Image: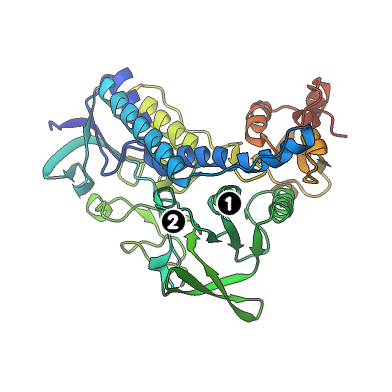
Amino acid sequence: MNYDFDLFVIGAGSGGVSAARRVGKEYGAKVGIAERDLVGGTCVIRGCVPKKLMVYASKFAHLYTDALGYGWSPVTPEFDWAKLTKAVHGEVMRLNGIYKNMLSNSQVELFEYSASFLDPHTLQVGDRTITAKKILIAVGGEAVKLDIPGKEHCITSREIFNLPQQPKRMLVVGAGYIAVEFAGIMHGLGTEVTHAIRGERFLRGFDIDIQNSLYDAVIQRGIKVLTGCHITKITKQGDALLVDIQRQGEDITVETDAVLMAIGRAPLLGGLGLDKAKVKVVLGKHYEDLPKLDGYTPNSAIKVNSFSRTSQPHIFAVGDCTNRINLTPVAIAEGRAFADTEFGGKRRAPNHANVPSAVFSQPEAASVGLTEAEARQKLGDDRTKIFKSTFRPMFNTLAGSQEKALIKLIVDAKTDKVLGAHMVGDNAAEIMQGIAIAIKMGATKKQFDATVGIHPSAAEEFVTLR
């Protein structure tokens, strides 16, 4: 049978674009890609890139204060929200153009429409019917909201970049990395932030020392944290929002100007017509306070094997819609592995072991490998050795800050291999990227110890732990 395309990709985010470009440019196949939104995906358009720009902006406020300890005279700075958001939007649009050009230069045809299956080889793309020999689903995910009265008054990480005015007060709901990052951003920019979480600490799944260290630092920086919260209702009263919360056996109401709902993200499976393509979906647990999205629970995902193949042998899926490791570099790696395997004759599965991650909180947090709890569960207490240092960074001494940094290594006592590394402190992400290489290569604690540290630096603590 003759097909319109050798490969058609649904979704022009990081995973979809990386696969499409490699198949089109390096392997010479005929490729099409559909995207109903801006090209670049969540990371470029409403995630990593614009968020990191706002993180940079938010850090200047405390630097003005820190400078006093270093001999600088006091200043009274003013912040312009409209100027920042306009600049961020301009950079997003520039990147959108670059991604379009990259697709064009790779001989990939872009369709600026949504796509859905009519049958396993046929797609409805806008007003066109398109057939493809192989199809890659890379639609990513979207932020979800609690299914409570007044949820329409909330914003998510999608809308926060487009607020016409900076809120004077903001309630952030959620304990994951997006919530923690935006709480820090808005606080740094001058908004009075209250952070409501359901549990007792942020960043469930991260090492316990990261959770505790970051919790202490956030409170020390002036963010009000409410633990044990269950949000029940949001009511608009004039220009303000009243948020009803059940907390520790009592009902409280928080008045605020904006509510950022950052409780998680869900794969964008609705509207794809997966049933018509006979593509199996792993249905996640249904939570009463989270709505179903087009019939799917928020933690549902497309079922794939280690080579990103779905239940249909010619249909594949990568990135957040598979709910494996939802990080941009992972989606890119999955997309490239798919391209090499299916079109380049280089059979390989994406490697999901020891993937480093960072939270651009304030201070930053970063990790790679096993947490202490995971190591103890896997190896037992006797084989799990912990090396840890908590210290006041040199910069903070003259600045007058009492904030501490955390460095931690998890080591297998039997093999001496370093199984995990964790850090809270400035530049944690930059430092952890290098540490991740060592752990990926199977470095031992003895080899860490034999490495000469760069002094004075926070990173040298990783090679001086005893």
Q: Secondary structure at mark 2?
A: loop
Where residue 338 sits in the image (x, y, percent)?
38, 31
Horizontal arrangement in the rendering, residue 273 relative to residue 282 (left or right):
left
**Mark number, residue 268:** none
Residue 369: tell me if it is visible: no
Kindly give the residue lying farthest to the right in the view shown. 466
Q: Which residue is mark 1?
A: 190
Q: Quadrant of the N terminus?
A: top left
Horizontal arrangement in the rendering, residue 42 relative to residue 53 (left or right):
left
Where residue 143 sits in the image (x, y, percent)?
42, 55
Mark 1 or 2: in front is 1
Q: Residue at x 36, y 28 (%)?
A: 339
As shown in the figure, which amino acid type bears the numbered disc 1? Gly
Q: Is residue 341 above or below residue 84?
A: above
What is the distance, in whole Å, between disc 1 and disc 2 at their CAs? 19 Å
As shown in the figure, which amino acid type bears the numbered disc 2? Thr
Q: Is residue 291 above or below residue 20?
A: below
Q: Residue at x 44, y 67 (%)?
A: 290
Where residue 113 sits in the image (x, y, percent)?
21, 43
